[in-house]
Image: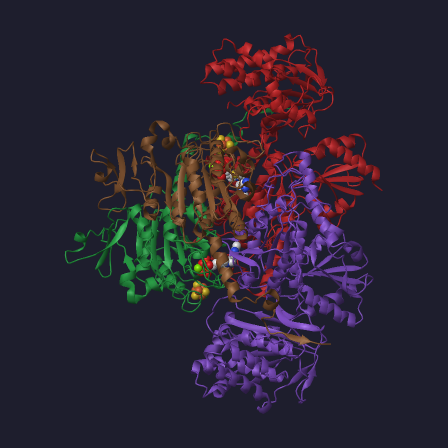
Chain colours: A red, B purple, C brown, D green
Amino acid sequence: MRDLEGAHVAAGSPPRPRTPRSSVVVRLSGDSGDGIQVAGGQLALATALSGADLETFPDFPAEIRAPAGTTFGVSSFQIHIADHRVHTVGDRPDLLVALNPAALKVNLPDLRPGALVILDPGTFKKRELERAGFTCDPRADGTLGPFRVLEIPIEELTRKATAGTGVSARDAGRAKNFWALGLVLWMHDRDTRSVEAWLARRFSNEPALLAANRAALAAGHSYGEVSELSIPAFTVGRARLEPGTYRTVNGLEALAFGLLAGGRDAGLELVYCSYPITPASGLLHQLANLRPLGVTTFQAEDEIAAISAAIGASYAGALGVTGTSGPGMALKTEALGLAAAVELPLVVIDVQRAGPSTGMPTKTEQSDLFQAVFGRNGEAPLVVLAAATPADAFAVAREAVRLAVHHMTPVVLLADGFLANAAEPWRIPELSPEPAFPVRFHTNREGFRPYRRDGRGVRPWVVPGTPGLAHRISGLERDFETGAISYDPTNHARMTAARRAKILAVADDVPPAALEQGEPDDRLVLVGWGSTYGAIADAVAAARARGRAVAHLHLRHLWPLPRGLGPLLAGFDRVLVPEMNTGQLAALLRAELLVPAEPLTKVTGRPFTVEELSRAIEARLEEAP
Amino acid sequence: MRDLEGAHVAAGSPPRPRTPRSSVVVRLSGDSGDGIQVAGGQLALATALSGADLETFPDFPAEIRAPAGTTFGVSSFQIHIADHRVHTVGDRPDLLVALNPAALKVNLPDLRPGALVILDPGTFKKRELERAGFTCDPRADGTLGPFRVLEIPIEELTRKATAGTGVSARDAGRAKNFWALGLVLWMHDRDTRSVEAWLARRFSNEPALLAANRAALAAGHSYGEVSELSIPAFTVGRARLEPGTYRTVNGLEALAFGLLAGGRDAGLELVYCSYPITPASGLLHQLANLRPLGVTTFQAEDEIAAISAAIGASYAGALGVTGTSGPGMALKTEALGLAAAVELPLVVIDVQRAGPSTGMPTKTEQSDLFQAVFGRNGEAPLVVLAAATPADAFAVAREAVRLAVHHMTPVVLLADGFLANAAEPWRIPELSPEPAFPVRFHTNREGFRPYRRDGRGVRPWVVPGTPGLAHRISGLERDFETGAISYDPTNHARMTAARRAKILAVADDVPPAALEQGEPDDRLVLVGWGSTYGAIADAVAAARARGRAVAHLHLRHLWPLPRGLGPLLAGFDRVLVPEMNTGQLAALLRAELLVPAEPLTKVTGRPFTVEELSRAIEARLEEAP
Amino acid sequence: MSAIHAPLRLEPKDYASDQEVRWCPGCGDYAILKAVEKALSELGADPDRTVFVSGIGCAARFPHYLATYGFHGIHGRAPAIATGIKLARPDLDVWVVGGDGDMLAIGTNHLVHALRRDPDLVILILNNAIYGLTKGQASPTTPIGTRTPTTPSGVVERPLSACEIALAAGARFVARSVDVHQKHLPEILVRARRHEGAAMVEILQNCVIYADGAWAAITDKAHAAETQLLLRHGEPLLFAEGRKGLAPARYRAGLRIVEVGPEGWQAAGVLVHDERDRTLATLLAALAPPLPVALGVLYADPAPTTFERAVHAQIEAERTRAPALDLAAAIRRAPTWTVSD
Amino acid sequence: MSAIHAPLRLEPKDYASDQEVRWCPGCGDYAILKAVEKALSELGADPDRTVFVSGIGCAARFPHYLATYGFHGIHGRAPAIATGIKLARPDLDVWVVGGDGDMLAIGTNHLVHALRRDPDLVILILNNAIYGLTKGQASPTTPIGTRTPTTPSGVVERPLSACEIALAAGARFVARSVDVHQKHLPEILVRARRHEGAAMVEILQNCVIYADGAWAAITDKAHAAETQLLLRHGEPLLFAEGRKGLAPARYRAGLRIVEVGPEGWQAAGVLVHDERDRTLATLLAALAPPLPVALGVLYADPAPTTFERAVHAQIEAERTRAPALDLAAAIRRAPTWTVSD
Ligand SMILES: Cc1ncc(C[n+]2csc(CCOP(=O)(O)OP(=O)(O)O)c2C)c(N)n1
Ligand SMILES: Cc1ncc(C[n+]2csc(CCOP(=O)(O)OP(=O)(O)O)c2C)c(N)n1
Ligand code: SF4
Ligand code: SF4
Ligand SMILES: [Mg+2]
Ligand SMILES: [Mg+2]
């Protein structure tokens, strides 16, 4: 793709009669074949170029190709556009573009009352309605009462617009996503330049398709101006973003870049070993396409082989990384214990999804925290981190690499299905020309002992091929220094304590607990982890704006917990822990800190809304002593 | 074996000049080839027949056949003999019989100061001493200073005694275990009748061996009387045991019988699926030999296949049971989640061993509690139980079956390497002629819904082959009633809550929390689980005898925790949780009940001693507010 | 099939469940589902005594679409689950269905061991040479050079052959068919079900989305005569409309292609297919393009008993040897003593 | 072996580590250890560039006893760990050692896939037809009828053949030897190490404690001439001191035993062993008592490249195609925009 850098955000076009909005939530929706995700991506880019802040989330069907027109084949894309920093994709759409009845059916329950619904009357035929599961036409039976509805014959208008471009009738119809995009861009006060540039590249070898899509885009864009319907138009101002160069990034992309940046900073090649599983597969795909940048990717025969190969790679002096989702994580349990026992660096990425068992693979959840912290046989402590937002995943992945190599330990990085696919603007970091935390393998023969620990309790990393240091490692308990098999009771106690102490000491290598928002003497604190960040941040900000004494603390380091967390939490009357599980972090805080942390749980496969959290905050403040 | 039932405990033989002892701890030790375990077993039987209480523990070498004379080839057997109920094998031996220098070397650190050590000077040759790792002869350099030592040329005396029985010199020497047993029986005021009876059966086809072993036994027994050495003789009175018929049982035997009793009570065949692993393999061996009693055993290709086959068996209407140890448990994680998701009964036995990873396979630990309660992807709640003593394992196994079938849930039963091999007298329970908790499969077509729950939140168990009820189950999230795949957010929340509530409701089906010893207003309570029972019980009893306000609570049900536990614990000033890990139950209690439970940890691969616990009790009472 | 029940008379459609089938339009799995329904009808299978067990994948959705008992389990473990079912209930009619990823990647271990143990199962491998459900990654049967999201420069690993692995594992029934062969496939399925023991059927299946035409070189109607060797027990190994055949190699062990002249196939030395010849089956399994691919029953030689029958026979014998043994007696096999008040 | 270093001149004993060897006295593993030390010496292996990887079992204790780098991993996963090592460090000389349980029960999946991928590994299967370390349970190679603690009435499952599975998996080097063959075994090990790609060697090993004499029918010196077929590339397939041989079967595909008359083996039609003939190797692998068992290199036909070389060649090519691509550039492949103050 062409680098749009330098496309400095221009001042807006000449004023039109538009409502200024501080934020708008738009959802595009249609059949899987309708090109919704492409249109959404272009909408996001155009929005980003406008200087507004944004957050996006694609919602794919679980089925690969559901029959056209069915509800389970609906594909959607939501974008939150704002003139200030936003952290969520928005609770409920203000504007829905539904390209067929099924898309309407699926999205209806999510709409904000009063939302604007744009639909294509041409698709509201009997067969389509039936397919979508409507018994009556929803336009006729009051279903759409709470909303403002605009019926625009999008497909028909697209065909008209593309007539003469030489494309087939089928291809003409397929350009309707660009027609709709054009309209939404107009409503949103954006020009079509970035989309045209993209089309030009995308269809550089298919002039007829290029012409058709361009025509559709232009027609949609001008429709707002010319239509007899009074189509609402709004404008969202620029957000105050830190200066810098930006791109949008989703969680999986950020993880991939963060791992690569970490490898670079450690001065190590990565070996990423994985077995496909939704929603983690995308990370393997990303990295497979970035192999020239210092990562070897390996699709193993199963998750056990994947983690085993990653351990082998770390043993050999690369950084082994493995990634998976819930059920695959379960399968890695035994080998993860081996990595902890032999004390090799390893990064394990768990893109959590709704469980238990196969659960709902395409839906999000945070229910693998217990598994990450506690789920192994024996005392096998390791480090657990979580990424809070798509962009944060970059930093956390890099941090995972740093802690793994610096402390010779497996590090589990928890992401989730929502974070993996949600996207937001990301200020591209400067990559230091020199490795920031280069690994120095141990090569000194003098008094070498494979398990002799340094001041931080960390054993040396000696890679095969190092002259004179040949030694053996094993998952059997080993001697505190020599590493030879040892069944000595005192040695086992000492090793168990040393492994634990080493991990707990990681807390000295990470920032102490600190509030995201609020003051240590506020009444209520919301403690979050992972992808609930956005909703909590927005809800707390809103509550504080309402004058509520509410704070937000977000944990990146889940094990060990950061220093100072206990005293900090002790200062609040109430500690509320919103999480997409049945209370796992709350249990961890209670066990570790004896604070009466109260879980606020949601297990629907969907992220929290700001509204849900706001209500919970108000309820707690009312009750609080 | 002959049924010794009816061998009513006879009154002791005519009094001799013996020290009456309330309890004695004896350890027999020698090379793996020396027949120590056989002698130990006979010592235990003779002791049991004397009416004393006892507890035994065999300590095998980790190696299959270590070279003779090495310390890692030493095999030992310890027995605690007492005129009152004992619950441990005794902290430290009062009497050690060491058949070679290696046995002395290995056991020295464990001896009570002043203990009696019997050794065979004929084995203290240069080569043997070197093999055992002695640089000087320990008899000469003061090493044995703290002990009373008797040097008896056991092997030589055995050869003399067996001369003329027609056995080879080699076989003559191999009878020395019976010589030593004879001597120990004499010291302990027991006759040799039960041993002779056993020999007669064992060597019924080998008259020369029978004669030799008998001669050795008799010679050892008479040696005490005739020897010029003044060999100490003691007598231990009868313990007050509940009336009934007894046998000795170790943990694995009790588990096997308990499972079979449970199957009988449920009216179900068992299918026990397992993959060999120390120390759980013995359970597979036991059950393989008991197949005619209603269990099909299946040695699978790995642990994943084992649990999968067990799930298949339960699906088909038998009770699937799988057993393993730590690393194997880790491998079962994913499938365990499936069982929880589809809500089929399943019993999973984890005979814990020292970890992490391969760890120390022959050593004991309690470090899989977290894994059992928390170690799965997604929210996959299930029931977790633990057996407290070898005999208790019978009741707990039966309980596991009951809860599994009654609540349609996987049940994890935690045992450990110590409990598996330790043995104690067991009052043989009456087996009711009728199944005590018969399973009634659902067969009614009327309004059948595969996941419709009853009042206890339990779904029906419908087995394939039931006419008219064909349906599909899946690890994907399923509809609350129909069981069809469902990605509906509300349904998922509802199902997650229902699965959790079902498991928490198991607490209504088990006894509320109660103290083993002590009063609810004592100052300190020791909360234990699993095989620490004996040491805690004895330490608390001793402390109470010293007038300390200490109580003992022992958890059989670890998840869900029994009702009333929180209020009960809240009544104590301090809650101390002794466990062979780094504080897992303590963390669970803190998380669930917010009680400041304090862990008392031991991770040496060995059980707690009463002394260690007694010291901890005193220290806590001194500090307590 | 060990269930001894009078066959039912149900139409193929009676075996369809009420669930909406959710494969992609055009997916080869539809044809396989149809063939399975036909086979069940032909067999007179009782839906209430029939169980379909599967792992995870597009293929593994199978049980949901059949009106029998069904267990959609976890990825790769279906053969193990099915073995447990047969141990508990030898009377049930149990089918296992999985994709090439399910059975030949994560599940290889269980497939191999199920086949060597030989419980009375039909095991269907729906081989589309791709991971369908997870969106198109290479599977163990994807040809070298194929570009997928995980192999951007093409697969470098050699593909596995389901039939060769099955034979090496000791399978006693190994067959291959094609999704769209709507006469051949149901016939093979019926044969597989009637075989006593583990019967593996590899079905070449077309994934229209991620590996469209993966088997076209074999299945294309235009060249089918040249690319397919249709096996029939007792009939000569002929293809190319009888113009070519397979004969024993000369001066080495193996097969060679011979032209059949006017003197007929016997004269050309063409071999007759013998389903009980494991060696022949192994050689036939190894045939791959540009040689014609063997379709049909490569090997069928039932063992004297099945795994579950052997196990239960042992238990029966043990029971007979110790008729008085019950749990109470077993507990008392160790020395006992009595404590009285 | 891809490491290009001048061979060292070390004695076999120089490859022994300082750890006391703890197998049972008389265990066949001692002989195998000796043979491995001999082979390493013969190969001039550099202990500092050599890695032994193993799973769990008696056999898997191997790495502890060698003065090379060693990784004693977890049960069944050694081939996967070794694949990771080779991906990270193609220059290391990596050996995998495991028992029949480790490699053919829990580890079958990884064995099969390592062989089909073909990284440059030597994989030794120490087959004693039993689980030694866990005290004598049946393994996947234990013969039918064997009584063990888990099979009190005898094994009912058919044993697996390591060589047949390996060939079916696509292995390009498959050999078999015997623990006590102290000339044969080191030779085979040297050949295996010199083969580029995954080389599987099955070693018949005697467990004196739990399966003593399991292979006696094959290895007993007294009948060795009749029970062993010693393979040498380019030499006729003769046994029984040259009195018998293997010839192509007549009227079917396969091998048959022929008596060698005074006219010599050629006249009897005895085949010449060709290590590159996969079909022949498959037939030889299937020979089992009462037929003579094939010892030596059954199959050796290196693929054009190894797994790790193919992967790294792809990466190199990708790098060449996009020479300017670094992480900063990759991040900026998506549209970017700049926010200024
Ligand atoms: C333990 C585990 N790992 C990975 C997955 C993800 N997964 C689901 S199906 C599948 C493979 C599908 O391929 P195949 O078995 O060939 O079936 P197809 O979809 O092609 O019919 C994978 C990797 C999973 N569900 N569980
Ligand atoms: C996950 C796991 N399951 C089971 C075991 C127990 N185990 C250790 S070695 C072994 C099998 C040993 O047999 P084999 O591989 O043939 O080696 P041998 O001891 O015969 O040399 C088993 C089952 C284990 N360590 N880990
Ligand atoms: S992805 Fe392929 S295999 Fe899966 S349903 Fe679609 S066409 Fe069939
Ligand atoms: S048990 Fe068998 S394989 Fe293991 S060391 Fe002893 S003899 Fe060798
Ligand atoms: Mg597939
Ligand atoms: Mg073995």
**Residue A466 point in image, percent of width and height:** 44, 52
Q: Looking at the image, is B336 positioned above or below residue B296?
A: above
Q: Nearer the viewer, residue A384 or D15?
A: A384
Residue B524 in sight from this viewpoint: yes
Whether residue A448 is visible: no
**Image location (x, y in percent) of residue B134:** 51, 75
Number of numbered discs on residues: 0
Percent of width and height locating residue B292: 55, 62
- Left or right: where does residue C189 sit relative to residue A246? left
Q: Which image quadrant: the C terminus of chain A?
A: top right
Between B577 and C255, the one lying in front of the other is C255
Rendered view: D198 above or below B97 = above
Apparent side of residue B474 relative to residue A466 in the rendered image (left or right): right
Q: Residue at x 62, y 22 (%)?
A: A130
Residue depicted at x 24% and y 61%: D240
Q: Residue A395, located in which quarter of the rendered image?
A: top right
What x and y, as percent, mark residue C297? 38, 41
Q: Is residue A228 above or below residue D114?
A: above
Extreme residue in the right direction: A625
Please tell me in which quadrant of the rendered image residue B349 appears.
Answer: bottom right
Depth order, front residue of B359/A6: B359
